[in-house]
């Protein structure tokens, strides 16, 4: 089958990212219930601990991909004039890119 | 019984309007189509709708009945809330009153090559199917192309010329699933595009209104699974 | 343009969304879309909260304080509903993808369940925040 990124791959990315985020949320919730960090030091230790940092980074990547596929679907459904549609897609791309930069700063900082 | 019916007669800058009918029904009038016939013969012979077999086989009299799509001929009058509000299938261009233009709908149907494709070599005798292979067509071959499902699908409302819609996609699976068909790869290729198949959001409005009790939403999910398997 | 193409061009379409009666699955699906867009709009605020809270004790305190005012609480409630509904409806979709709960009867029940659970979780959050 020919590879068309906007067809089957987009759908698979949406599904797989959803699955990963679901598992991460369950994991984070469980870990939160074990520790229940109180105060700044405990919270920082909890949020930046090795056992959550990488999963959290992956979660953010999954979230950005999932957001792109989902918002793109919304635009393809409702916005039909081509210039407007391209503008909306560019806006969403810029929004997600800015978000990615901000997340990267937090996770590496 | 009281009816509110969408009227549109083309020409002269006419606009669609709703018209009220109060009809005295005959005890033999049991289905919605009977009432429409009663209106047409006793009150207003300008009212236009399609009909043919009057028993849910030809798929001609699909319309929006009190906000849901269905076939007038197999919708019992009993239990319908009054005034019974009839409108044409949502989203389709209206030719006149309850008659919609299905040209694009049937072009889309044609685009999925709705026939068993086999370039040969041909067998000496007919192509046999095992009972299991035949059973895979159940729930697919029964579709009568009445367009009730596609006319109730939001994805089809937004992208009627690029998304194929539930009816055509169910028909696509009917040939993908056929053991005698040799064109599965080409069929999946045709559907693997951003719009044709992948505008489906699994809302399931199609399944809700199918007068034959079929499940186009599940058919679409199965096509996606076939694609994933073909990729692996 | 001949008569037929001219007529085709002006044909009306009936698509008044307020005149249709929607099945429970359509409500669930529409809410899935709305909650998804809401979550996307919430994302910058969440990143900001995470960033401030990890900056230092003062930032952490600021975040704790920000969570107090009425508006922030209301926003948090909207977020909780959006997240709950989006995740639950998403799980429903994932299961349907692998042909679990794809029949109409089960899909109707799961749509009801998702819609009700989303609101229930919202009420729980309301109780916790009040």
Image (cartoon, rainbow, N blue to C red):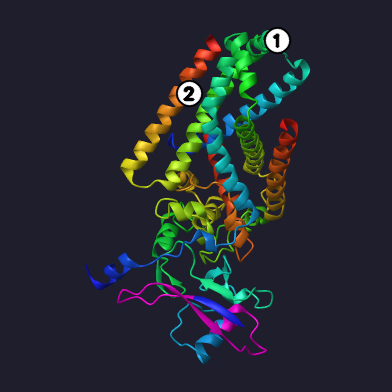
Q: Residue at the front extreme?
A: C69
Q: Report whether residue B232 is seen.
A: no
* Residue A1, above or below B70: above
User: Which of the two discs, 1 and 2, labels the residue nearer the N terminus?
Assistant: 1
Front-most of B179 and B110?
B110
Which residue sits at x=51%, y=33%? C41
Q: Which percent across, then down, holds residue C74?
A: 63, 35
Q: Which residue is mark 2?
A: A99
Viewer-side label of 1, 2: 1
Q: Residues within 10 Å of mark 1 (few under 14, many from 20)?
A: few
**Disc 1 to disc 2, how far (Cα)?**
26 Å
Which residue sits at x=56%, y=49%? B220
Judged from the image, the secondary structure of the residue bearing numbered disc 2 is helix
Q: Which residue is mark 1?
A: A42
Judged from the image, the secondary structure of the residue bearing numbered disc 1 is helix
Q: Report whether residue B203 is seen.
A: yes
Quadrant containing the N terminus of chain C is bottom left
Front-most of B38 and B189?
B38
Examine the image and state in which quarter residue C51 appears.
top right
Q: Which residues are magenta?
A: B6-35
């Amino acid at each position: 089958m020919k590879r068309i990124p906007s067809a089957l791959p987009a759908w698979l990315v949406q599904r797989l990212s959803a699955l990963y985020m679901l598992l991460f949320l369950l994991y984070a919730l469980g870990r939160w219930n074990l520790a229940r960090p109180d105060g700044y030091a405990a919270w920082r230790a909890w949020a930046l601990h090795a056992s959550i940092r990488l999963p959290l980074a992956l979660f953010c990547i999954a979230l950005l991909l999932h957001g792109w596929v989902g918002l793109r679907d919304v635009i393809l459904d409702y916005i039909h004039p081509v210039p407007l549609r391209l503008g909306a897609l560019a806006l969403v791309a810029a929004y997600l890119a800015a978000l990615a930069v901000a997340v990267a700063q937090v996770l590496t900082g | 019984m009281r009816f509110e019916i969408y009227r549109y007669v083309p020409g002269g800058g006419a606009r669609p309007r709703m018209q009220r009918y109060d009809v005295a029904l005959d005890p033999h009038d049991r289905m919605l189509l009977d009432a429409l016939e009663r209106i047409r013969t006793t009150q207003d012979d300008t009212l236009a709708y399609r009909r043919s077999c009057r028993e849910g086989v030809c798929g001609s009299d699909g319309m929006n009945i009190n906000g849901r799509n269905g076939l007038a001929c197999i919708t019992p009058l009993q239990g319908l809330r009054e005034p019974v509000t009839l409108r044409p299938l949502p989203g389709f261009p209206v030719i006149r009153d309850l008659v919609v233009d299905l040209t694009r709908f049937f072009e889309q149907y044609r685009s999925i090559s709705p026939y068993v494709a086999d370039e040969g070599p041909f067998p000496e005798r007919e192509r046999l199917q095992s009972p299991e292979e035949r059973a895979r067509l159940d729930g697919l071959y029964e579709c009568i192309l009445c367009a009730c499902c596609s006319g109730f699908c939001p994805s089809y409302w937004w992208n009627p010329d690029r998304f194929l819609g539930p009816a055509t996609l169910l028909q696509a699976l009917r040939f993908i699933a056929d053991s005698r068909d040799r064109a599965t790869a080409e069929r999946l290729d045709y559907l693997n595009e951003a719009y044709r198949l992948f505008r489906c959001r699994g809302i399931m409005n199609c399944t809700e209104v199918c007068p034959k009790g079929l499940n186009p939403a599940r058919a679409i999910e199965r096509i996606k699974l076939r694609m994933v398997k073909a990729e692996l | 343009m001949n008569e037929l193409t001219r007529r085709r061009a002006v044909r009306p379409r009936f698509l008044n969304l307020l005149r249709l009666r929607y099945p429970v699955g359509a409500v669930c699906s529409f809410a899935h879309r709305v909650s998804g867009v809401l979550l996307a709009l919430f994302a910058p605020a969440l990143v900001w909260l995470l960033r401030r809270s990890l900056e230092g004790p003062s930032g952490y305190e600021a975040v704790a304080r920000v969570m107090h005012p009425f508006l922030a609480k209301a926003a948090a409630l909207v977020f909780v509903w959006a997240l709950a509904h989006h995740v639950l409806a998403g799980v429903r979709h994932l299961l349907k993808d692998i042909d679990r709960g794809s029949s109409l009867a089960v899909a109707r029940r799961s749509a009801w369940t998702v819609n009700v659970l989303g609101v229930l979780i919202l009420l729980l959050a309301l109780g916790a925040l009040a």
